[in-house]
Image (spheres, rainbow, N blue to C red):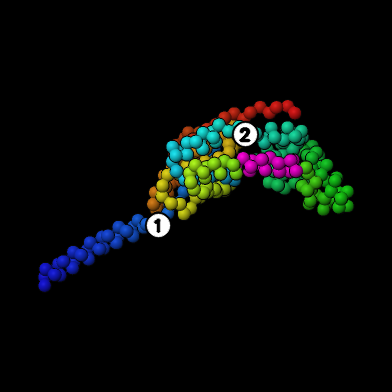
Amino acid sequence: MLRFLCLISIGCTLAYICFAQDSSTPANARGVIRLRVRVKVGDATKGLPRKRFFLIKGSAEQNKSFIDTVEHQTTLTRECYYRRLGASEALVKWLKESDCESVYCREITAEDLGGPDGVPEFQTALLAGEKEFGNRDLARKWLTVNLPENIRDGFYQSRQRDLRALIKQAETVSGASVLSVMGDRNGTAYFTDIEPGPYLISSILPIEIANTFVTWNCALTVKPGDLATERPFLISNKQDKNVKCVGIEKPLPVCDAK
């Protein structure tokens, strides 16, 4: 009887150990990547707000052909795009002030329609709206519909076409869907419910920062149980303490005269 009880005790102990091991690392464990993007311009360092980043399955080696394409792509800057259209200096400045890819990214105020900072394209659209609607306030509310399409959001649309093509390439190379997140005003974003394994965090398209283009393709590995409360995966345009990945910087090209 004593021997029988001992065998039962040993069996229960082994079962408990196995259960504890299985429960601590469940088969469907997922991780979270807390991405933090900080950039240094001159002596100032700050979070990079409202920029989209992408998570691509597989290691840097597995995604080498995609990385090569991204790092050698020819990209038109916002300023060059609008200057080729013959846009006014005021419009170029207005878009640059809030890092806008289209006229929808910020409110068009009364100051933008007159005075020293008035934007000629907005003034022309306002006059067209007044003739159409017979009301200045209504014309200002619907001002964007009287802007030419290429001025209104042509640059944004061209970026989206390039982005869709590169995402398709990334998905073909990796064999998995590409995930994306938008950073908040401090440059923080979260990729959640991620399977363990190697990944690539990419900006895909270069991002304009001051007078440079910056492109990120950062390799990392997600482990079971990685939590957002852990130290963030910090990336930057400059090497610094705790920075895990430094983007490739290239000077912005000089715009051709129209």
Q: Quadrant location of the C terminus?
A: top right
Question: Relative to residue 66, is residue 195 drawn left or right?
Answer: left
Q: What stretch is highlighted in magenta?
A: 149-163
212 vs 99: above or below: above
Asked if one can make out residue 207 in the rendered structure from this viewpoint, the answer is yes
What residue lies at 30% left-to-right and 57% top-to-bottom? 21
Task: Residue type at mark 2: give it.
Answer: Thr
Instruction: Determine the secondary structure under disc 1.
Output: loop
Q: Earlier in the sequence, mark 1 or mark 2?
A: 1
What residue lies at 11% left-to-right and 68% top-to-bottom? 3
Q: Find residue 58 and report its horizontal and vertical position in percent.
A: 45, 43
> Is residue 155 one of those drawn in magenta?
yes
Q: Find residue 99 and report its horizontal and vertical position in percent.
A: 65, 40
Asked if one can make out residue 100 in the rendered structure from this viewpoint, the answer is no
Instruction: Determine the secondary structure under disc 2.
Output: loop
Labels 1 & 2 near each other (Cβ < 8 A): no
Residue under pointer 2 = 75
Residue 19 location, quadrant? bottom left
Q: Quadrant location of the N terminus?
A: bottom left
Mark 1 closeness class: few <14, some 14–19, many ≥20 residues within 10 Å: few
Kindly report the secondary structure that dominates the magenta region of the rendered protein. helix
Q: Which of the numbered marks, if any, corresponds to residue 28?
A: 1
